[in-house]
Image (tube, rainbow, N blue to C red):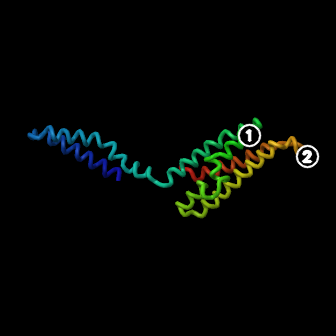
Amino acid sequence: ARCVALLVCIGCLIHSSTALSVGSSRTPQRSALGRRAAVMLPFLASAPLAARAASPEDPLLAELVSVKTALEPLQALLDQEKWDQVRSVLKAPPVANLWNLGESKNTLRKLADLRDDVELFELADEVSGALQLADQYTYDNNFIYYQPGNGKVKIKEPKQQLKIAAEKLSTVLPK
């Protein structure tokens, strides 16, 4: 479709330049047509891209990209034992949409509904479980010093769960 629009515009340009060389009495009008066609060329050539931007999947995919971006700094925050900051990211949208705010808000489930993809529903459950475990381990670390036991914080476990969630999200996102 993009090639067709491009060929139509090129045809208009060639037609108007041919009219100019013949010396028709309507040369200014033909010249204006050629300029209009030249100005419209980028818009017509990108028309299929604009039509694609209207896809109902695009906002969902954009939200998933923002989730993946939000997860990236959490590994370092866990190393610094900044539990509250990690939980703040996990408990707030858009990350919370994937595990904490119910299935109707879950972006992966919405995408699975649009695509009618059973495997994507399973992936949504896996991501949800990984994020939930990461939050639980992080929450437990907040209170580990006041609980009976060896008092050992768990950093490796929430980091593993965040890595699992990010890897599974990457399988859905466009490359």
Marks 1 and 2: CB-CB under 8 Å?
no
Which sits in the foreground, 159 or 3? 159
Residue at the disc numbered 1: 84
The image shows residue 52 at horizontal and vertical percentages of 43, 52
Tell me the residue at 71%/39% (across/down).
Answer: 85
The disc labelled 1 sits on which kind of residue? Asp
Residue ID for mark 2: 148
* Relative depth, front residue between 104 and 136: 104
Which amino acid lies under the numbered mark 2 shown in the image of this protein?
Answer: Pro
Of 48 and 67, nearer the camera is 67
- Left/right placement of residue 142 relative to residue 109 reads right
Question: Residue 1: where, in percent of width, then height?
Answer: 35, 53
Q: Secondary structure at mark 2?
A: loop
Residue 82: quarter of image:
top right
Which mark sits nearer the N-terminus, 1 or 2?
1
Q: CA distance from mark 1 to mark 2?
A: 21 Å
Of all residues, the one furthest to the left in this rendering is: 25
Image-based side of 33 in relation to 118, left or right? left
| Residue located 68% across and 46% down the image | 90
